[in-house]
Image (tube, rainbow, N blue to C red):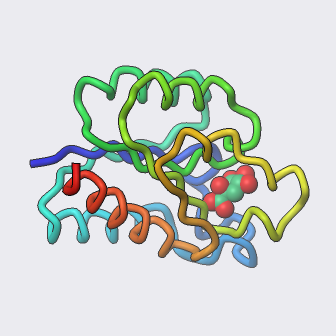
Amino acid sequence: MKKILVVHGPNLGLLGKREPQVYGTVTLKQINQSLEKLAKIKRVKLTIKQSNHEGEIVDLIGKGKAKFEGLLINPAAYTHTSVAIRDAISASLIPAVEVHLSNIYSREEFRHKSLISPVAKGTVIGFGAKSYTLGLEALIDLLDVK
Ligand code: DQA
């Protein structure tokens, strides 16, 4: 059974209450439940983590390279700032799919740049909670093809 690491970056634990006009009202728990449901159908095993700390995310990815075949990540605010997370993904050689709930290109200019996209296999942006399940499905397809 293929193993996939799911990483939610900073402040995503607040989903549901956090700026619902931007991120919707779905909670992180509900997102994780829909990911688990899809994982069961597709017969993959998920390990899901949320962290507000850049170094912890770097460690999760670094340690994960021996354990996981794929990475689904919403780096949240670190998308726009973290060379360290980008380098961790790049060094891990694990195929990564980047997801965002909101369309970062239709928001403030500082969100228009993702440092992560160049090292991701692909990105799913702007479909709210659905970005995650679309991203997971794409990642699983990618792993099946390999
Ligand atoms: C986000 C977009 C980021 O710009 C923001 O900092 C987040 C969430 C999204 O999923 O839309 O925290 O990654």
Q: Residue furthest front?
A: 146
Residue at 41 percent of width and 21 percent of height: 62
63 lies left or right of 39: right
Q: Is residue 55 above or below residue 131?
A: above
Determine which quarter of the picture holds residue 18: bottom right
Camera-nearest residue between 15 and 6: 6
**Ligand 1 visible in quadrant:** bottom right
Residue at 36% across, 35% down: 94
Image location of residue 52, percent across then percent down = 60, 37
Count how many numbered circles sit on residues in the image. Answer: 0
Expressed as whole percent of the image width and height from the top left, the position of residue 90 reads 50, 28
Q: Quadrant of residue 35?
A: bottom left
Residue drawn at x 25%, y 23% is 66
Residue 142's place in the image compared with 91, above or below, is below
> Residue 69: x and y, percent?
25, 39
Given residues 43 and 121, the one toward you in this image is 121
69 is higher (above) or lower (below) than 21: above
Left or right: residue 63 compared with residue 87: left
Q: Name the residue located 39 percent from the left edge and 47 percent from the top edge.
A: 6
Q: Is residue 122 left or right of residue 16?
A: left
Q: Residue furthest left?
A: 1
Residue 40 is situated, as x and y percent measured from the top left of the image, at 15, 65
